[in-house]
Image (cartoon, rainbow, N blue to C red):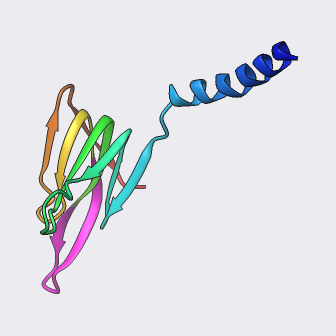
Amino acid sequence: MKLIVLLAAATVAVPLAICQDHPQRLHQMIGHVSLSADSIQRDISQAAYTPIIQLKGDVEIVKPLCAPAGPAGGLVCEEEMVLHADEAEYREDTGEITPKGNVHVTFRKIK
């Protein structure tokens, strides 16, 4: 009887341990900017709102590159920047990105 209980407990514990080794990727859209990473956090330790978002682990930030078009003030967005980094901070108010670690930036046409 003890052996059956032990085997049942081991069967339940093993899948949980395997799932913890593969964290779920997180995604967030801020306007037209796509953020994805293993961890996405905003510093809420202060009472005031903070526009800084901290991204850690296999960071990808995709941001459209737009230019003014015509006197009406419209924008034309034909390309996007794709940034990969180990870590990054994204300032929601200015769009400024501060990458850290292994950083790679590419540009591609918007589909």
Name the outermost residue toward the bottom.
72
Compared with residue 86, is residue 7 higher up or lower down, i.e. above or below? above
Give, as a single range, the part of the protein colored magenta.
66-81
79 drawn magenta: yes
At 14% from the left and 62% from the top, the residue drawn is 50
Q: Position of residue 76 (x, y in %)?
A: 25, 68
Q: Position of residue 92 (x, y in %)?
A: 19, 62
Q: Nearer the viewer, residue 28 or 8?
A: 8
Compared with residue 47, is residue 58 higher up or lower down, i.e. above or below? above
Q: Position of residue 17 (x, y in %)?
A: 58, 25
At 18% from the left and 27% from the top, the residue drawn is 101
Q: Nearer the viewer, residue 64 or 86?
A: 86
87 drawn magenta: no
Task: Give the side of residue 90 with respect to residue 56, left or right.
Answer: left
Q: Quadrant of the N terminus?
A: top right
Task: Give the side of residue 13 with respect to residue 33, left or right.
Answer: right
At 73% from the left and 24% from the top, the residue drawn is 9
Task: Give the side of residue 7 with respect to residue 81, left or right.
Answer: right
* Res 74 → quadrant: bottom left
